[in-house]
Every structure is written in structure tokens, then in C-alpha cells.
Amino acid sequence: MSDDFGVGAQVFVRAATAGESSLWPDEPSGVIVRSGGSALAGVWGRGGGGRMWWVEFDEPQSNSDGDGPFPSAQVHERFLELAPPVRDSE
């Protein structure tokens, strides 16, 4: 897991691969607003080991069960990808 995740990081929530389950099938983007769940303790739970982050979505999202739309949610770090840095255009 990357140490670059943290409050203020812009991220994409990736879809699950075979054998995984992701609650956010539409691969939303957003910003990390705080740590969540087992983020501080690094404990094992339903999502496995690792950190959880609260992501505020750019647009409200419905989960894989069709519930929502939610403006934010806890997302396991393994489903997060950092957004590429914005480059100044000259």
C-alpha cells in the first residue's frame, strides 16, 4: 500500500477484480476527507487487513446493492488509486 494516501488526496475508486467485492462498481472519483474504520489500528475485518479512508465523491454514488446515492463512504485502500497530478499548461 502506498504512503501517499491521506487527507486531501484525490483518488479514483477502482472496480473489483475476480475474487474481490467492491461496493462501488461505477469507479467514482473523489477526495479523501479522513481516515476511517481500521485505518489507525490496521486490524483485520470484513475487508481484510489494511487501511480504510472516507472518500467524498465528486458526485453522489449508488453502491453495488443499488442503495444510495451516497455523497461519501468508507473505502478500503486496496480499491483506491491516486489521481494523476495536475500539470500546469503553458
Image (tube, helix red, strand yellow):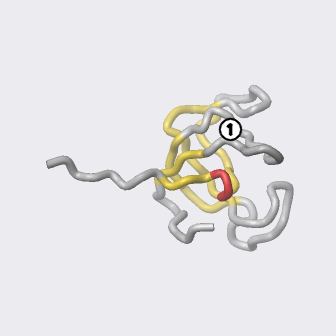
Q: Residue at x 48, y 57 (%)?
A: 9
* Residue 12 horizontal/vertical position (percent): 54, 46
- Residue at 79% across, 30% down: 65
Mark 1: secondary structure: loop
Within 10 Å of disc 1 (Cα), the crowding (few <14, some 14-19, many 20+) is many
Q: Quadrant of residue 28?
A: top right
The quadrant the N terminus occupies is bottom right
Image x and y of residue 14, in percent: 62, 45
According to the image, label 1 marks what residue?
24
Q: Is residue 45 left or right of residue 38?
A: right
Q: Vertical placement of 42 versus 24: above or below?
A: below
In the picture shown, does residue 66 fall above or below 21? above
Q: Which of these two is toward me, 78 or 33? A: 78
Residue 48 vs 27, above or below: the answer is below
Q: Position of residue 72 (x, y in %)?
A: 61, 42
Coordinates of residue 64 in the picture (x, y in percent):
75, 32
**In percent of the image, x 46 and y 58: which residue is there?**
8
Q: Residue furthest left?
A: 90
Amino acid at circle 1: Trp
Q: Residue at x 79, y 66 (%)?
A: 49
Using the image as rendered, state which of residue 53 and residue 18 is in the foreground. Answer: 18
Residue 9 falls left or right of residue 25:
left
Residue extending farthest top: 66
Total tally of numbered discs in the picture: 1
